[in-house]
Image (spheres, grey):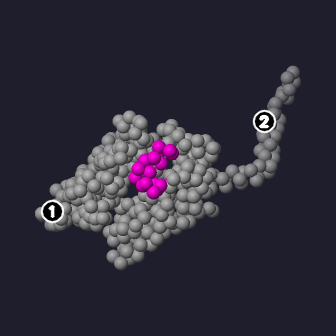
Amino acid sequence: MSEFRKLKTGIFIPPHHPIDEDPTLCMERDLELTEWAEHLGYDEVWYGEHHSGGYELIGSPELFIATAAARTKRIKLGTGVVSLPYHNPFMVAQRFVQLDHLTRGRAMLGCGPGLLILDAMMLGVPPKKSRERMEESLDIILRLLAGETVNHESEWITLRDARLHLLPYTRPRPHVAVASAVTPNGAYLAGRYGLGMLCVTASLFAGYDVLGVNWDVACKTAAEYGRTMDRQDLRVVTQIHLAETREEAINNCKWGFDKYQDYMAALYPDGGRLGKGGLEEVMSRDMIVIGTPDDAIEFLEKYWEKTGGFGTLLMFGINWARFEATKRSYELFARYVRPKFEGRMWERQESLDYMRANAEDYGSQRIQAAKETVEKRFSNVVPRGATRPPV
């Protein structure tokens, strides 16, 4: 029997919406995509927090989750991520507990230091202190979620006998994950506190190269604190777009790729996270997949081997393709990639192969059985015009 692998799937929506589109309709489209993901059986959707640049429109992932939760029933919804240096940790914990109750445990708290430097600068957060402040805030949030009373004084946080008057719906604690990009900071925090890892740059430059390194950091740190990391809590985020043919998939993505690259160039003048090349050049690095379901299966096998396995695959919702093509891509993945990668096709294939291998023998038995039935049923039939012999 082939290997059985349980893979959760989802969508990571920063989002990336070009500035030539109506922002209200863009946000509505993200909500529709969430409903579509639930319809297809995806497990989770994550929403980012950004405050500048014009493209990444969601300023409060918590508000977005509240709206999405009202439109869905099963799928889990995560903050991808709350930028902890921008908020008082007590308020983050309070808002998330409310979400945890409103969603009956479907909300997930993703935490990070903040991605856009302009966001931090507008809020007076020194970029060099963002990771330090994230760690400080995260520790407080976890203590509050555990029901502790917290007293804390620092240059940006003051808490006096702070405690939540409403504890989480999910016990012992809601799911919490930390963003892990290039530096090992997120991996260290995941290991220290026993949290999930959200590898948001798993398909981009150095983020891909340090996947294994950061997981090792998380595992070694967890061991130091008497914990063990579970690969089911490891999430990798990558760009996947599928169509019936590779040519169609490439043409779909050319629709929005240049706009995305222009935005990335504004963030990263050195060429952005994908570099300065065109779509084909980016594809040649084998860190993303734009093609057919078979291409995606081959790609996932490579990822699985590189990481040693992971719990959830999240696909970037960065709008390289038109909306209908994007929806079709997620459908193709759900119908053809995930079940085959998990090994759920094996029994069906074995049954069909066995039937085909024995088709001649079974066919002859079927014909013989039908022949004997005909002979039996018609053996006592009296021909027309004949008389039945007396009993």
Q: Is residue 68 visible?
A: yes
Region rendered in magenta: 257-274
Q: Is residue 292 above or below residue 147?
A: above
* Place of residue 294 in the rendered image (x, y in percent of width and height, measured from the top left): 62, 51
Numbered label tally: 2
Q: Secondary structure at mark 2?
A: helix
Q: Residue at x 29, y 45 (%)?
A: 63
- Going from N to C along the chain, the mark reached first, 2 or 1, is 1
Q: Residue at x 72, y 51 (%)?
A: 355
Splitting the image into 4 quarters, where does residue 302 fall? bottom right
Splitting the image into 4 quarters, where does residue 216 fall? bottom left
- Image quarter in which the C terminus is found: top right
Q: Is residue 194 visible?
A: no
Q: Residue at x 33, y 71 (%)?
A: 192
Q: Is residue 78 above or below residue 195?
A: above
Residue at mark 1: 158
